[in-house]
Amino acid sequence: MKVALIGASGFVGAQVLKEALQRGHEVTAIVRDAAKITTQDARLTVKAVDVHNTEELAEIVAGHDAVVSAYNPGWQDPQLYDSYIVGSEAVQLAVKESGVKRFIVVGGAGSLEVAPGVQLVDTPEFPAEWKQGALAARDYLNTIRKEDKLDWTFVSPAIMLQPGQRTGKYRTATNNPIFNAENKSEISVEDLAVALIDELEQNNFIRQRFTAGY
């Protein structure tokens, strides 16, 4: 497939890029700083674009089979909540204007329900340093759920997302975190990328959110 990947140099995006190329997909990596992409591959094209420039972004992603957005303004952004919402909505608009229908978004775990009607981000123990980003991802999920022109999928990782090993094994759910035998909700970023590219290829969660964990 021909895939446009927004945020290809980030924590999740870099692994999605690696996984997509390993599977033979042709990738256009869209980043703020092209110098951050050092991968050499004949199937890789790198474009430096400001996602807020929806006209330019739409032109670049047009003609692709799918757009994957791992957009994140950066955890150090003092206006993280607003920046995340504005940037995510700009990406969504650009994809719609491009004519591409398939759109996969990397979101957060904060919107997963840990008890009936209770989302992780609203629990007292949720870390304060992650809260604004988690709230933004939760609110953007509510926005994209109203989207009826795109074949979108919103991907939430397990509660603990860390660098690790690519096992190629994981389980999926829709709105509740997946816990293992030790009552931990976790996945490596490498296996989250596997789950995302599997969804790209299999289309199991069209116009749904799903989560992946061990």
Image (spheres, helix red, strand yellow):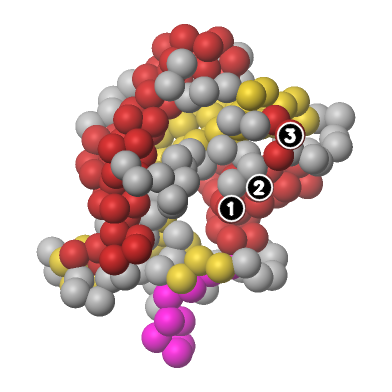
Marks 2 and 1 close (CB-CB < 8 Å): yes
Residue under label 2, please give it.
Answer: 14
Residue under label 1, please give it.
Answer: 11
- In the picture, which quadrant includes the N terminus? top right
Measured as percent of width and height from the top left, residue 11 is found at 58, 53
Look at the image and say whether residue 185 sits in the magenta stretch.
Answer: yes
The quadrant holding residue 95 is: top left
Q: Is residue 75 above or below residue 97?
A: below
User: Any mark on residue 26, and which?
Assistant: none
Furthest residue in direction front, as rendered: 78
Label 2 – label 1 distance at C-alpha: 6 Å
Please state which amino acid type lies under the numbered disc 2: Ala
Look at the image and say whether residue 116 sits in the magenta stretch.
Answer: no
Total number of numbered discs in the rendering: 3
Please identify, in this view, whether the residue under mark 1 or under mark 3 is nearer the observer. Answer: 3
Measured as percent of width and height from the top left, residue 103 is found at 46, 32
Residue under label 3, please give it.
Answer: 35
| Horizontal relation, residue 9 to residue 100: left or right | right
